[in-house]
Amino acid sequence: MATNAVDETEATKATTDEKAVDTTTSDEVPQTEVPAAADDAPVEEESSSAADGAPAKEGSPSGVGQGAAAVVSAALGVVSLTGSWIGTVASARQNLVGQLETAQNAGVAQQIQAVYGDAWQTTALWGGLFALIALVVGVVTLARPAFGTPGRIQAPWIKSVAWAGVALGVIGLFLAVLKYTGILLGLPSAS
């Protein structure tokens, strides 16, 4: 009886080996089994910087600061062209100062200059200041990769927005100079 039990276990072992081996047809390529140790190995996930071809380092710069600086540059350029709350308040203050300091017997040209001309120049100065800041921030944002991590390229949208900030800064600075000197929308003559 003991031999009969051994024969049965050998027969079942042989049939399971045949099933494991004979799982392919003649047209299929036989598949190899992966060892169990490979299935248990930890899988490392790729980070976004590793997928881009750059080595993944903890604490590596992500470009968020450069993107923010580019957006700030463009926003300041727009503010230099459209005007700001600070410029409006400074202009109104200068208007009031001009009204208080102008004597009753002053000539019309002097009153126009004191009340309106100085306020217009104050608005031009604030617009020029915002334009100059936009220009500097834009240029620094564009020049930053040259002093940063070698081989790390700047995102194209950051360059585009920074160039927009530089262009708006140049236009705003040019218009501020024209407004301040009276070439653009100068004061009317009193004669």
Image (spheres, grey):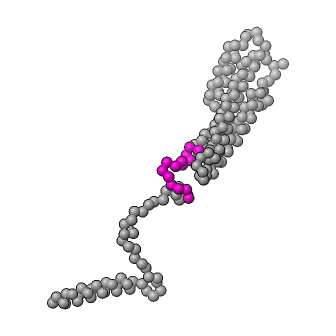
Residue 58 horizontal side relative to residue 186, left or right? left
- For residue 62: magenta? yes
Q: Quadrant of residue 103?
A: top right
Q: In which quarter of the image is residue 112?
A: top right
In the image as oriented, which residue stretches furthest toward the top?
A: 105
In the image as oriented, which residue stretches furthest toward the right?
A: 191
**At 60% across and 53% down in the image, what residue appears?**
151
Q: Is residue 47 visible?
A: yes
Q: In this orientation, which residue lies closer to the viewer: 158 or 1? A: 1
Up/down of 44 relative to 35, above or below = above
Q: Can residue 83 be seen in this view?
A: no
Q: Where is residue 74 in the image (x, y as percent from the top left)?
A: 64, 41
Q: Position of residue 48 (x, y in %)?
A: 51, 56
Instruction: Point out the stretch of residues depicted in magenta.
Output: 53-66
Position of the N terminus, as image quadrant, is bottom left
Q: How many marks?
A: 0
- For residue 159: magenta? no
Q: In this orientation, which residue lies closer to the viewer: 53 or 169? A: 53
Up/down of 8 relative to 188, above or below = below
Q: Where is residue 40 in the image (x, y as percent from the top left)?
A: 37, 66
Position of the C terminus, as image quadrant, is top right
**At 37% across and 69% down in the image, what residue appears?**
37
Q: Where is residue 89 in the image (x, y as percent from the top left)?
A: 63, 25
Q: Quadrant of residue 130?
A: top right
Residue 80 horizontal side relative to residue 183, left or right? left
**At 68% across and 35% down in the image, what residue appears?**
131
**At 66% across and 41% down in the image, what residue appears?**
139
Up/down of 16 relative to 112, above or below = below
- Label the magenta part by its dominant secondary structure: loop
Up/down of 143 relative to 191, above or below = below
Q: In this orientation, which residue lies closer to the viewer: 127 or 104? A: 127
Q: In this orientation, which residue lies closer to the viewer: 88 or 129? A: 129
